Amino acid sequence: MNIIKNYHITHKDPFCTKKVRKRQKIYEEGNLVAIYDSKAMVEGHSLIITKHHSLGLLDLKEQDGALLFKIIKKVLPPILNLYNCGVPAYDLKIRSGDYSGRTVNHFHVHMIPRRIVSGPDGKFMYERIYENNLKNPDRPFLDDISEEVKSLRRKINEEEVIHNIKPILKAKFDMDNVNIYKNTFYVSEHFMAIYHPNPVIEGHSILVPRRDFSDLLDISESESIDLVRTYAKIMKLLLDNYGKGSRSYITSMVVGGYDSAPVDRLHINLIPRSKLDCYSGRNDEIYYDLYENAVRIPIMKESQISDEVKSLRRMLS
């Protein structure tokens, strides 16, 4: 990607220290390291970080962006097998910049299993991770993660486990017949950039594969490369138009785990952030608004979204 150059930094963050990487590492390749999160939201919550300091996804070189998907496909199945009974339901989240809610100023991808639990009424439901953690934002660090790290290291090295996860989700409807296409403002070889039909903030867009699949583990190598390039192009555009000079943005993707999701087809949320955003207090609340809140109040009218789509198309033509 390498669209925006790194700012000069004068301090080190925890992810820049070899001690953290050595203690928490479950897998490494090239400039990327997968580690177990010492302040995990749920069991299995892991991260992918860069060895060399990078501020955000747009700061990665294109080869590291492609490598990121390769590592996700390698380490996520063992995580789901160990902590999620093999069910392909998980979140991937990346927060970059001062207004994104990130707590460590170093590129990192959250990989969070979405487990099925017994709800208050006795019925099974997907665990409400963010709602629970908003009530306890100062959740304690785990005293000892050595067993989790050892288990995942073993599983990642077992080839039969790597291929054990099979995509089981199917799109709830054929997106070829869905009106959402009217919000498309860019089409690449494998992906479409679409202005979100119910954005949580101005500029909120999604990347959707042209091929119908639900699980990132099912993405092909050519699709991964195209996604890296398309992401860089579109996020740069969104920051230029909606970031108000900020280098803050959120990248969020969910597979399964939300009973109220309108569609199961893979979709990646691109959310430019700025200090003028309407979200106050804990920044994680934006995730709750995105996925957990059953009733949302639209912030933009359909006509306003249509105008934004036309504007973005002109800029990309």
Image (cartoon, grey):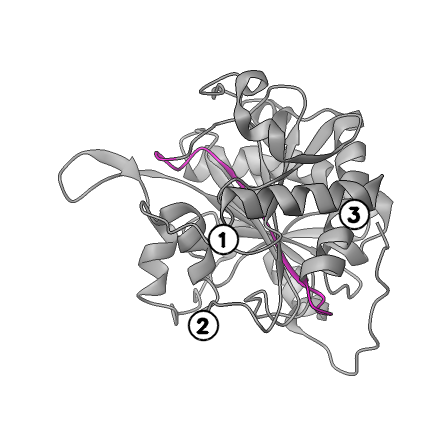
Q: Are marks 2 and 1 in contact (CB under 8 Å)?
A: no
Q: Earlier in the sequence, mark 3 or mark 2?
A: 3
Q: Which residue is mark 3?
A: 232
Q: Quadrant of the C terminus?
A: top right
Q: Looking at the picture, which amino acid does disc 2 mark?
A: Ser
| Mark 3: secondary structure | helix
| Mark 1: secondary structure | loop
Q: Earlier in the sequence, mark 3 or mark 1?
A: 1
In the orientation shown, which residue stands out farthest toward the bottom?
A: 10
Give percent across and percent down for residue 281.
43, 73
Q: Which residue is mark 1?
A: 200
Q: Looking at the picture, which amino acid does disc 3 mark?
A: Ala
Q: Looking at the picture, which amino acid does disc 1 mark?
A: Val
Q: Which residue is mark 2?
A: 280
At x 65% / y 47%, what residue is drawn? 308
Give how far apart the Cα atoms at labels 3 and 2 are: 28 Å
Give percent across and percent down for residue 104.
61, 70
- Work out whether residue 140 or residue 168 is closer to the camera in this orientation and state it: 168
At x 72% / y 30%, what residue is drawn? 191
Give how far apart the Cα atoms at labels 3 and 1 are: 21 Å
Above or below for 172 versus 88: above
Q: From where the camera sits, is residue 220 visible?
A: yes
At x 59% / y 17%, what residue is drawn? 176
Disc 2 versus disc 1: nearer the observer: 1
- Work out whether residue 124 or residue 188 is closer to the camera in this orientation and state it: 188
Q: Earlier in the sequence, mark 2 or mark 1?
A: 1
Query: On the picture, is 199 further left or further right than 67?
Result: left
